[in-house]
């Protein structure tokens, strides 16, 4: 009988340790993913599609649609 109680206590302690280890690993993983996601940069191609909804003429200097607010102006394709 005494051995059965020790075995149950051992399994109980082992499960508590396992749960704590899983929680720590999960927190580290989620923090790492959050850090990587916050430092991600998007490409400029998203800006071109956003300007397309507003309209404008293709600016050959920048390769994007220009609604006339570019201070340098736009140039025709050579």
Image (cartoon, helix red, strand yellow):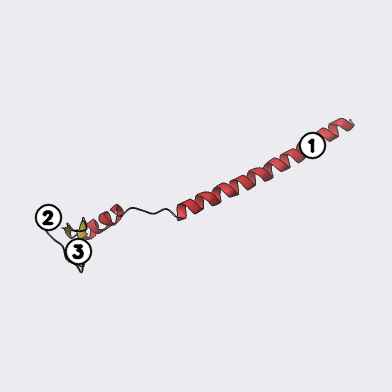
Left or right of residue 46: residue 14: right
> Who comes first in sequence, dot 1 or dot 3?
1
Q: Is residue 18 above or below residue 44?
A: above
**Residue underneath mark 1:** 10
Classify mark 3: helix, strand or loop.
Answer: loop
> Who comes first in sequence, dot 1 or dot 2?
1
Left or right of residue 71: residue 2: right
Q: Residue furthest bottom?
A: 71
Residue displayed at 42% across by 53% down: 40
Where is residue 17 drawn, in percent x and y?
72, 42
Label at residue 67: 3
> Who comes first in sequence, dot 2 or dot 3?
3
Q: Is residue 21 above or below residue 62?
A: above
Which part of the image, by quadrant, shows the N terminus? top right
Pointer 2: residues within 10 angstroms few (<14), some, or many (20+)? few
Which part of the image, by quadrant, shows the C terminus? bottom left
């Amino acid at each position: 009988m005494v051995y059965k109680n020790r075995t149950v206590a051992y399994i109980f302690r082992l499960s508590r340790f396992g749960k704590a280890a899983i929680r720590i690993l999960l927190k580290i993983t989620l923090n790492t993913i959050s850090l990587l996601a916050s430092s991600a940069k998007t490409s400029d191609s998203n800006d071109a599609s956003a300007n397309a909804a507003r309209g404008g003429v293709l600016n050959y200097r920048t390769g994007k649609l220009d609604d006339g607010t570019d201070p340098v102006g736009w140039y025709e394709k050579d």
